[in-house]
Image (cartoon, helix red, strand yellow):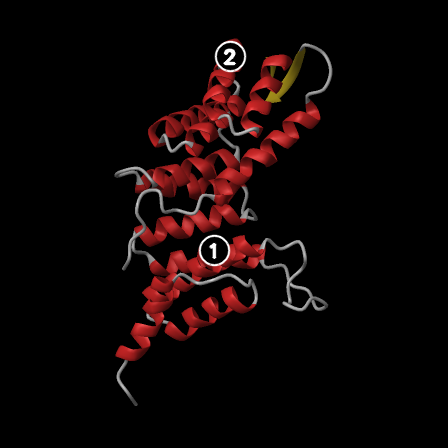
Protein backbone atom coordinates (compact mmCIF):
# COMPACT_ATOMS: atom_id res chain seq x y z
CA UNK A 1 0.00 0.00 0.00
CA UNK A 2 1.21 3.52 -0.74
CA UNK A 3 0.76 4.88 2.77
CA UNK A 4 -0.05 8.60 3.07
CA UNK A 5 2.82 10.64 4.42
CA UNK A 6 2.53 13.39 6.99
CA UNK A 7 1.16 16.45 5.27
CA UNK A 8 -0.39 14.42 2.45
CA UNK A 9 -3.86 14.25 4.00
CA UNK A 10 -6.23 16.41 2.01
CA UNK A 11 -6.98 19.31 4.32
CA UNK A 12 -9.61 21.06 2.25
CA UNK A 13 -12.15 20.35 4.97
CA UNK A 14 -9.89 21.86 7.62
CA UNK A 15 -9.20 25.07 5.73
CA UNK A 16 -12.74 25.39 4.53
CA UNK A 17 -13.80 25.64 8.16
CA UNK A 18 -12.05 29.01 8.49
CA UNK A 19 -14.56 30.80 6.30
CA UNK A 20 -17.50 28.84 7.71
CA UNK A 21 -16.68 29.45 11.34
CA UNK A 22 -15.67 33.06 10.93
CA UNK A 23 -18.68 33.93 8.80
CA UNK A 24 -20.95 32.86 11.64
CA UNK A 25 -18.89 34.82 14.12
CA UNK A 26 -19.04 38.07 12.16
CA UNK A 27 -22.77 37.74 11.65
CA UNK A 28 -23.39 37.41 15.37
CA UNK A 29 -20.82 39.91 16.58
CA UNK A 30 -22.18 43.31 15.65
CA UNK A 31 -22.41 46.36 17.84
CA UNK A 32 -20.65 47.55 20.97
CA UNK A 33 -17.12 47.10 22.29
CA UNK A 34 -17.95 43.85 24.07
CA UNK A 35 -20.17 40.87 23.46
CA UNK A 36 -21.55 37.96 25.43
CA UNK A 37 -21.26 34.48 23.94
CA UNK A 38 -22.64 31.17 25.13
CA UNK A 39 -20.37 28.15 25.35
CA UNK A 40 -21.66 24.88 26.81
CA UNK A 41 -24.36 26.72 28.71
CA UNK A 42 -21.92 29.22 30.19
CA UNK A 43 -21.85 32.90 29.26
CA UNK A 44 -18.44 34.35 28.37
CA UNK A 45 -17.46 37.97 27.85
CA UNK A 46 -15.45 38.67 24.67
CA UNK A 47 -13.79 41.89 23.56
CA UNK A 48 -15.53 42.66 20.27
CA UNK A 49 -12.80 44.86 18.77
CA UNK A 50 -10.03 42.36 19.47
CA UNK A 51 -12.16 39.54 18.15
CA UNK A 52 -13.00 41.24 14.86
CA UNK A 53 -9.38 42.29 14.38
CA UNK A 54 -8.29 38.66 14.67
CA UNK A 55 -11.06 37.60 12.28
CA UNK A 56 -10.01 40.14 9.67
CA UNK A 57 -6.32 39.22 9.83
CA UNK A 58 -7.23 35.57 9.45
CA UNK A 59 -9.46 36.33 6.48
CA UNK A 60 -6.53 38.13 4.85
CA UNK A 61 -4.36 35.06 5.54
CA UNK A 62 -1.94 37.17 7.55
CA UNK A 63 -1.53 34.24 9.87
CA UNK A 64 1.37 35.37 12.05
CA UNK A 65 -0.38 38.62 12.92
CA UNK A 66 -3.64 36.72 13.34
CA UNK A 67 -1.95 34.43 15.87
CA UNK A 68 -0.93 37.42 17.95
CA UNK A 69 -4.43 38.86 17.64
CA UNK A 70 -6.02 35.61 18.84
CA UNK A 71 -3.59 35.64 21.77
CA UNK A 72 -5.10 38.96 22.79
CA UNK A 73 -8.61 37.49 22.65
CA UNK A 74 -7.51 34.46 24.66
CA UNK A 75 -5.74 36.64 27.22
CA UNK A 76 -9.08 38.25 28.04
CA UNK A 77 -10.98 34.93 28.09
CA UNK A 78 -8.74 31.83 28.17
CA UNK A 79 -11.75 29.48 28.14
CA UNK A 80 -13.06 30.63 24.75
CA UNK A 81 -12.89 27.49 22.61
CA UNK A 82 -13.56 29.25 19.29
CA UNK A 83 -10.52 31.49 19.77
CA UNK A 84 -8.30 28.46 20.42
CA UNK A 85 -9.83 26.75 17.39
CA UNK A 86 -9.10 29.65 15.06
CA UNK A 87 -5.61 29.99 16.45
CA UNK A 88 -5.15 26.29 15.66
CA UNK A 89 -6.36 26.90 12.11
CA UNK A 90 -3.73 29.62 11.68
CA UNK A 91 -1.01 27.27 12.88
CA UNK A 92 -2.38 24.59 10.56
CA UNK A 93 -2.14 26.87 7.55
CA UNK A 94 1.56 27.54 8.18
CA UNK A 95 2.14 23.82 8.89
CA UNK A 96 3.05 24.20 12.55
CA UNK A 97 1.57 20.79 13.34
CA UNK A 98 2.52 20.49 17.01
CA UNK A 99 1.28 24.00 17.80
CA UNK A 100 -1.95 23.41 15.88
CA UNK A 101 -2.50 20.20 17.78
CA UNK A 102 -2.04 21.95 21.11
CA UNK A 103 -4.58 24.64 20.25
CA UNK A 104 -7.10 22.14 18.91
CA UNK A 105 -6.73 20.25 22.18
CA UNK A 106 -7.39 23.45 24.11
CA UNK A 107 -10.45 24.12 21.95
CA UNK A 108 -11.69 20.61 22.67
CA UNK A 109 -11.12 21.08 26.39
CA UNK A 110 -13.40 24.11 26.50
CA UNK A 111 -15.90 22.98 23.83
CA UNK A 112 -15.77 19.17 24.01
CA UNK A 113 -18.86 18.37 21.95
CA UNK A 114 -18.01 20.51 18.94
CA UNK A 115 -17.76 18.10 15.99
CA UNK A 116 -15.77 20.54 13.84
CA UNK A 117 -13.09 20.87 16.51
CA UNK A 118 -12.95 17.08 16.89
CA UNK A 119 -12.75 16.59 13.12
CA UNK A 120 -9.81 18.97 12.76
CA UNK A 121 -8.10 17.56 15.85
CA UNK A 122 -8.41 14.05 14.44
CA UNK A 123 -6.99 15.16 11.12
CA UNK A 124 -3.97 16.82 12.70
CA UNK A 125 -3.35 13.71 14.81
CA UNK A 126 -3.13 11.81 11.51
CA UNK A 127 -0.18 14.00 10.52
CA UNK A 128 1.66 13.43 13.77
CA UNK A 129 3.87 10.51 14.78
CA UNK A 130 2.24 7.70 16.75
CA UNK A 131 -1.13 9.40 17.21
CA UNK A 132 -3.32 7.08 15.14
CA UNK A 133 -5.28 5.85 18.17
CA UNK A 134 -5.94 9.45 19.22
CA UNK A 135 -7.06 10.31 15.67
CA UNK A 136 -9.51 7.43 15.62
CA UNK A 137 -10.90 8.36 19.04
CA UNK A 138 -11.46 12.00 18.08
CA UNK A 139 -12.96 11.21 14.69
CA UNK A 140 -15.26 8.48 15.98
CA UNK A 141 -16.53 10.86 18.64
CA UNK A 142 -17.07 13.54 15.98
CA UNK A 143 -19.06 11.06 13.86
CA UNK A 144 -21.28 10.19 16.83
CA UNK A 145 -22.04 13.87 17.42
CA UNK A 146 -22.44 14.84 13.75
CA UNK A 147 -22.93 11.78 11.51
CA UNK A 148 -23.87 13.86 8.45
CA UNK A 149 -20.64 15.85 8.08
CA UNK A 150 -18.73 14.34 5.12
CA UNK A 151 -15.32 15.61 6.19
CA UNK A 152 -15.50 13.54 9.36
CA UNK A 153 -16.10 10.35 7.38
CA UNK A 154 -13.38 11.28 4.89
CA UNK A 155 -10.83 11.63 7.67
CA UNK A 156 -12.11 8.49 9.41
CA UNK A 157 -11.52 6.63 6.17
CA UNK A 158 -7.93 7.88 6.13
CA UNK A 159 -7.45 6.81 9.75
CA UNK A 160 -8.81 3.32 9.12
CA UNK A 161 -6.60 3.01 6.04
CA UNK A 162 -3.62 3.86 8.21
CA UNK A 163 -4.79 1.13 10.60
CA UNK A 164 -5.14 -1.25 7.63
CA UNK A 165 -8.81 -1.82 8.41
CA UNK A 166 -9.96 -1.73 4.81
CA UNK A 167 -13.62 -2.59 5.37
CA UNK A 168 -14.13 0.26 7.83
CA UNK A 169 -12.11 2.59 5.62
CA UNK A 170 -14.39 1.82 2.67
CA UNK A 171 -17.54 2.22 4.76
CA UNK A 172 -16.62 5.77 5.71
CA UNK A 173 -15.33 6.62 2.23
CA UNK A 174 -18.70 5.51 0.85
CA UNK A 175 -20.57 7.64 3.39
CA UNK A 176 -18.44 10.70 2.56
CA UNK A 177 -19.14 10.32 -1.17
CA UNK A 178 -22.86 9.77 -0.63
CA UNK A 179 -23.15 12.86 1.57
CA UNK A 180 -21.40 15.09 -0.99
CA UNK A 181 -22.77 13.68 -4.26
CA UNK A 182 -26.28 15.15 -4.20
CA UNK A 183 -28.02 13.74 -7.30
CA UNK A 184 -30.04 15.65 -9.85
CA UNK A 185 -32.19 14.30 -12.67
CA UNK A 186 -31.91 17.49 -14.70
CA UNK A 187 -28.18 18.26 -14.74
CA UNK A 188 -25.81 16.94 -17.40
CA UNK A 189 -23.50 15.22 -14.92
CA UNK A 190 -26.29 13.89 -12.72
CA UNK A 191 -25.30 16.05 -9.77
CA UNK A 192 -26.94 19.02 -8.12
CA UNK A 193 -25.27 22.33 -9.01
CA UNK A 194 -24.41 22.86 -5.33
CA UNK A 195 -21.99 19.91 -5.35
CA UNK A 196 -18.32 20.86 -4.93
CA UNK A 197 -16.85 18.79 -7.76
CA UNK A 198 -13.27 19.18 -6.57
CA UNK A 199 -14.20 17.92 -3.12
CA UNK A 200 -16.20 15.03 -4.57
CA UNK A 201 -13.28 14.03 -6.79
CA UNK A 202 -10.99 13.83 -3.75
CA UNK A 203 -13.53 11.70 -1.91
CA UNK A 204 -13.96 9.41 -4.93
CA UNK A 205 -10.20 8.89 -5.12
CA UNK A 206 -10.17 7.89 -1.46
CA UNK A 207 -13.01 5.47 -2.24
CA UNK A 208 -10.95 4.06 -5.13
CA UNK A 209 -7.93 3.55 -2.86
CA UNK A 210 -10.07 1.53 -0.47
CA UNK A 211 -11.29 -0.67 -3.32
CA UNK A 212 -7.71 -1.16 -4.51
CA UNK A 213 -6.65 -2.37 -1.07
CA UNK A 214 -9.56 -4.81 -1.11
CA UNK A 215 -8.54 -6.09 -4.55
CA UNK A 216 -11.70 -4.67 -6.17
CA UNK A 217 -10.13 -3.17 -9.27
CA UNK A 218 -13.34 -2.87 -11.30
CA UNK A 219 -14.95 -0.84 -8.52
CA UNK A 220 -11.79 1.25 -8.13
CA UNK A 221 -11.82 1.99 -11.87
CA UNK A 222 -15.49 3.00 -11.68
CA UNK A 223 -14.63 5.53 -8.96
CA UNK A 224 -11.79 6.98 -11.02
CA UNK A 225 -14.02 7.15 -14.09
CA UNK A 226 -16.45 9.27 -12.07
CA UNK A 227 -13.59 11.61 -11.14
CA UNK A 228 -12.84 12.26 -14.80
CA UNK A 229 -16.28 12.06 -16.40
CA UNK A 230 -18.55 13.40 -13.68
CA UNK A 231 -16.23 15.80 -11.83
CA UNK A 232 -13.99 16.73 -14.81
CA UNK A 233 -10.88 16.35 -12.65
CA UNK A 234 -7.62 14.58 -13.51
CA UNK A 235 -6.72 11.38 -11.70
CA UNK A 236 -3.08 11.33 -10.52
CA UNK A 237 -0.96 9.07 -12.71
CA UNK A 238 0.27 6.98 -9.77
CA UNK A 239 -3.25 6.22 -8.60
CA UNK A 240 -4.47 5.33 -12.07
CA UNK A 241 -1.41 3.14 -12.59
CA UNK A 242 -2.22 1.08 -9.49
CA UNK A 243 -5.46 -0.02 -11.14
CA UNK A 244 -3.90 -0.53 -14.57
CA UNK A 245 -0.93 -2.48 -13.21
CA UNK A 246 -3.16 -4.71 -11.12
CA UNK A 247 -5.35 -5.48 -14.12
CA UNK A 248 -2.28 -6.32 -16.22
CA UNK A 249 -0.91 -8.62 -13.51
CA UNK A 250 -4.19 -10.49 -13.05
CA UNK A 251 -4.17 -14.07 -14.40
CA UNK A 252 -5.88 -14.49 -17.74
CA UNK A 253 -9.07 -16.52 -17.92
When asked about the image quadrant of residue 7, the answer is top left
Residue 74 vertical position relative to residue 152 in the rendered view, above or below: above
Residue at image point 64% right, 31% down:
23
On the image, numbered disc 2 is attached to which residue? Answer: 72
Mark closer to the chain start, 2 or 1: 2
Mark 2 secondary-structure assignment: helix
- Label 2 CA crowd tier, 10 Å (few <14, some 14–19, many 20+): some
Indicate the quadrant containing the N terminus: top left, top right, bottom left or bottom right.
Answer: bottom left
Residue 113 position in % (x across, y down): 51, 32
Q: Is residue 207 left or right of residue 80?
A: left
Mark 1 secondary-structure assignment: helix
When asked about the image quadrant of residue 236, the answer is bottom left
Residue at image point 34% right, 60% down:
166
Residue at image point 69% right, 25% down:
28
Q: Residue 77 carries which label?
A: none
Q: In this view, does 127 lie to the left or right of 57?
A: left
Residue 32 position in % (x across, y down): 72, 11
Relative to the observer, which residue lies in front, 122 or 20?
Answer: 20
Residue 174 position in % (x across, y down): 48, 60
- Label 1 CA crowd tier, 10 Å (few <14, some 14–19, many 20+): some
Residue 234 position in % (x across, y down): 47, 62
Relative to the observer, which residue lies in front, 142 or 208?
Answer: 208
Residue 216 vertical position relative to residue 78 in the rendered view, above or below: below
On the image, numbered disc 1 is attached to which residue? Answer: 202
Q: Can residue 42 be seen in this view?
A: no
Relative to the observer, which residue lies in front, 118 or 26?
Answer: 26
Mark 2–mark 1 distance (CA, rounded to whole Å): 37 Å
Q: Can residue 23 be seen in this view?
A: yes
Amino acid sequence: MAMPQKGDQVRATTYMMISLVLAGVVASGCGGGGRRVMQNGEELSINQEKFLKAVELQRKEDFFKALRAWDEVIKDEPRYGLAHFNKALCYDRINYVAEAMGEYEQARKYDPKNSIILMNLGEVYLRADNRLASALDALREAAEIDPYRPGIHFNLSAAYMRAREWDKALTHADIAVDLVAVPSKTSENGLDKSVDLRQLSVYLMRQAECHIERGEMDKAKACLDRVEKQCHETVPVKLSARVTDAAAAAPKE
